[in-house]
Image: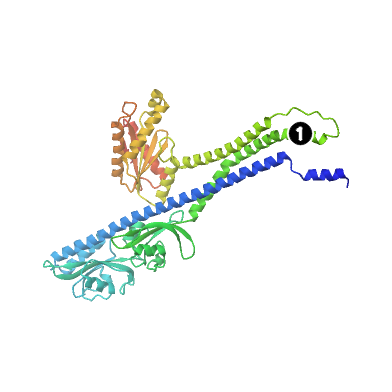
Amino acid sequence: MSLLHVKQAIQKRKVSLTTLMIGLVSVSVLLMLTILLIASYQSKKQALYETTLTLNLSTASKMSMTMDSLFESMRSSLKNAADFYSLNSDMKQSDSGKYLDLIRNSSNYFNSIVVVDENGVMRTLSPSSIGKAGEPIKTAAAKEALASRKPYLSKPYTSATTKNLMVFISEPLFDQKGVYRGYIGGSLYLQQNNVLNMIFGNDNLDHNGSYFYVVGSDGHLMYDPDKSQIGKDSTSNLIVQKLIKGQSGQELAVDEVGVKWLAGYSYVPENQWGVVVLSPISIVKEQLNNHIQAILLYTLIPFILLMLVTTFLARRLAKPFVTLANIVSKMGKEEVPIPAMKHHWNREADLLTSTVILAMNGIKTETDRLTQAAMTDALTGLNNRRTLETIMKKWIEEKKHYSIVVLDIDRFKTINDTYGHQEGDRVLQHLADIVRFSVSPDDLCSRYGGEEFVVLLPNAAPHVAFETAERIRTTMASSENHLKQMVTVSLGVAQFPSHAQTADELFLLADQALYKAKHAGRNKTVMAD
């Protein structure tokens, strides 16, 4: 092989300046994009974890308060019955049975009720199928209640008569002289239809796999969507151990089969039980994957455009060096004129650097904008339409009762035409402040679009929602604004599930009520039919 061929082979293995610069810029952009994705992934992951944990803790706390009130009402029902018996100690057996039937059927608190005298003999039972009057009590729980002579709540046990897994609640009986005369007690059958099923539902699984369960003071399951699990000992669970100690909180938990859950748990003071709300960590991963896919989708076209610009700039930057290399390679072989050197390559290098930095800032700005736009209305700071529709759909699926208020600024087009859109935007911001002030922190305020706003009121009866809507309307009409004239709103109110069974139907009914308010003269609140 000749020396010329060797030189040519060596030259082919060398990387040109243009390829090198394009490669370096490409690697730099890819690395920065990778870092951005990793940082965005971790930040979004932490935010989703914290949001889900906070939501689960809030849900568990609300449920524990509900259960606390429930058991307080159950005890109050037994206490009232005990007071009645103390005043009517000479009541006939038949009348006593009817009275117990009345208590059991009217409140639906208990599956069965029994009156036991101070000697441990059952005097009256409801229903009569659970035993016979005149027989002595047999279960350890019944005997403990008799011996305690004070309000009593048992641990779960299996009844020898009905074979039901149950808990027993009792209140002592005293005559008018203060002498202990036994107790009146109610039973809750854990694996049958009971007041817990009525309040919390027979199946609390939602679309993303979240669910809750209730544990007793001894760590046994009191309520679970899988009835076969009720009564199971779960004291090995770390969260259950904390509930037994009276603690509430939120944490990332791992079950016995290694599945990770985002858990919120709350202690119930009235009965020393605990409520645990769990969401599978897989729902967070699914949202993270969607988030990363969205970022890649939005950065793909800018990245392609950036590479085209980089190739062009690299060629422009390398051009003087290529020219110089060609000139140097010919030196010594022929006479070559030396061209005048230009310093344009410095400008091109600065431009390339600015382009890369601009691309990074563009990607970050776009990511922040998309994240913000996904949740919030930019003008008012309220939740946007997407967030509103997501929450409505979630509450509908959870069968959660709530009311919706749809409101619209009267003659808003006239305001825009008279004072300009900037002043109209200030009116929208003023209304947003009034809506925030007029509702509770648990209510959801959203700007649906244009001058239309929506408020969701969880667990609010229609009349409560109507009062809230009226408060917004009257406050808006009487408040001073920068236009120095009265600005009014018209409002429509509807409630799930009394008015509609789907989110679209509910919104449509509230919107129709709004337009009825408009047609009725504006500055009015109308309840949906």
Residue at 63 percent of width and 34 percent of height: 350
Classed neighbour count for the residue bearing mark 1: other residues with Cα under 10 Å, few (<14), some (14–19), many (≥20): some
Of 500 and 383, nearer the camera is 383
Q: Is 461 placed above or below 197 here?
A: above
Return the residue found at the far left: 177
Residue type of the residue flagged with mark 1:
Leu
Q: Is 295 placed above or below 252 here?
A: above
| Figure coloring | rainbow
Residue 147's image quarter? bottom left
Q: Indicate the secondary structure of the residue bearing disc 1.
A: helix
Answer whether residue 369 is visible to the viewer in this image. Answer: yes
Residue 333: x and y, percent?
Answer: 86, 34
Q: Is 471 placed above or below 199 here?
A: above
Residue 436: x and y, percent?
Answer: 34, 39
Q: Quadrant of the C terminus?
A: top left
Answer whether residue 290 is visible to the viewer in this image. Answer: no
Return the residue found at the far top: 418
- Image-based side of 48 in relation to 327, left or right: left
Of 57 and 232, nearer the camera is 57
Count of residue discs = 1
Residue at 57 percent of width and 40 percent of height: 360
Residue 375's image quarter? top left
Residue at 48 percent of width and 53 percent of height: 283
Residue at 60 percent of width and 41 percent of height: 300
Q: Which residue is mark 1?
A: 324
Of 16 and 371, nearer the camera is 16
Of 77 and 335, nearer the camera is 335
- Image-based side of 118 in relation to 285, left or right: left
Q: Is 420 placed above or below 121 here?
A: above
